[in-house]
Image: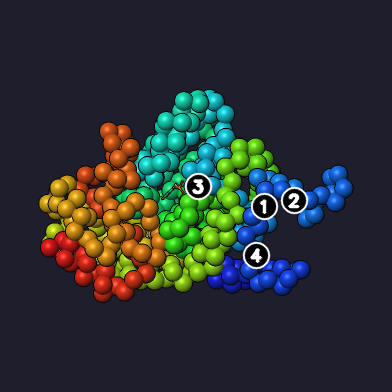
Amino acid sequence: MQPESGFSTRAVHTGSEADPVTGAVITPVYATSTFKQDGVGGLRNGYEYSRSANPTRTAWEECLAALENGRHGFAFASGLAAEDTLIRALLKPGDHVVIPNDAYGGTFRLFDKVAARWGVEYTAVPIDDPGALLAACTSATKLVWIETPTNPLLTIADITEITTALADHDLHVAVDNTFATPYLQQPLDLGADIVVHSTTKYVNGHSDTVGGAIAVNDDDLAERIRFHQNSMGAVMGPFDAWLTHRGAKTLSVRMERHCDTAERIAAYLSSHPKVAQVYYPGLESHPSHAVAAKQMSRFGGMVSFRHKDGEEASVEMCNRAKLFTLAESLGGVESLIEHPARMTHASAEGSELEVPSDLVRLSVGIEDAEDLLADLEQALD
Ligand SMILES: *Cc1c(COP(=O)(O)O)cnc(C)c1O
């Protein structure tokens, strides 16, 4: 596929060459751990053992790289496996990291409870304040972790402003692009060194796999990541790679619908008497709406809001929803509702990443918008 092809064309075709032997249009699930060698050291197409590389995973990794306008893609067993591999590839004890003060709870836990024990310190900053971010960088800072929009408060970081300000620093900038997806935002084009995904969410999009990904442009960086992917072994298996690749082919179509309906729901909630505040970067009232409009093509499918009647009312509302399934995770075709303080972000309680206790988070699916609005209406009643 030509790199200049459009996003949807790349999603459907990159990595999906017809099988040269059978003509199979879809890359099969290569359910094999090892590959026969033609004489000692005689590898066929470079495959020797499926931790190092597997053709089904390679097909997906090529597609994923193309979606992010990157030269190299890597698929992992989960988003956190991708993050952990990156931490080991880039950092050593004594190094320092800057992270968002409302990062995904599992990312925070990885830095706070795992990497910190291993001697990597972090500073959490408001990611929409580039001044605070710059001030937190020291000579020991080797990684700046950006999440935009953040989970669950949909805070926006200005990727271009941050990467430009840090251009002379000896560090890497990684962007967790899980919420925006490569369809709405391409961080490598905005100066980031690394893009990270939980493909569990929108990229796979059908709530039937757990997976992670990294995309980069730099060849040396890619070699370091490839070495650690193989050495640490947290790879995506061939069946998950096949499902994720299949899901990614419809990413553009799904995202358009997610965005259409999320915009309607954000507008509806904004005028609802029981709603105190709506967090959606597409709303002009969002403090970073202008930045979001500059770096994202649309505003995504995640909407959070605070219930006017407090924590118990917000919990009851989650329990009353019917079409919105009460569950963690996000980005699937089905709509989900959850209470971050008691569910996804419970591990951040008491930390600087604690979320408001009356917050409700919606992952707006691709069902009919009228049905979703009616469900919110009855649940808020
Ligand atoms: C879910 C999520 C992760 C972690 O990914 P897993 O696949 O669950 O390991 C990281 N970042 C964000 C923004 C997420 O939503």
**Under tag 3, what secondary structure?**
loop
Dot 1 lies on which element? loop
Whether the residue carrying mark 4 lies under 8 Å from ligand 1 is answered with no
Q: Which numbered marker is on residue 32? A: 1
**SS for tag 4?**
loop
Front tag of 1 and 4: 1
**Which mark lies nearer to you, 3 or 1?**
1
Badge 4 is on which residue? 27
Front-lying residue, 124 or 26 = 26
Between the residue at mark 3 and the residue at mark 1, the CA separation in whole angstroms equals: 20 Å
Distance CA(mark 1)–CA(mark 2):
7 Å
Q: Quadrant of residue 271?
A: bottom left
Viewer-proximal residue, 77 or 287? 77
Q: Are marks 1 and 2 in contact (CB under 8 Å)?
A: yes
Cα gap from disc 2 to disc 3, whole angstroms: 25 Å
The spot of residue 293 in percent (x, y) is 40, 63
Instruction: Pick whichever, 283 or 242, lies toward us.
Output: 242
Which residue occupies 40% across, 61% down?
A: 332
Please, is residue 109 above or below residue 38 in the view? above
Q: Indicate how the structure is coloured in the image.
A: rainbow
Q: CA distance from mark 1 to mark 4?
A: 14 Å
**In the depicted structure, whether residue 317 falls above or below residue 350:** below
Q: Of the two numbered discs 4 and 2 on the same chain, state the one appearing first in sequence.
A: 4
Q: Are there few (<14), some (14-19), or many (20+) residues within 10 Å of tag 1?
A: few
The CA span between labels 3 and 4 is 22 Å
Q: Is mark 3 within 8 Å of ligand 1?
A: yes
Q: In the drawing, what numbered circle is on residue 35? A: 2
Asked if the residue under mark 1 is in contact with the one under mark 3, i.e. CB atoms within 8 Å, the reply is no
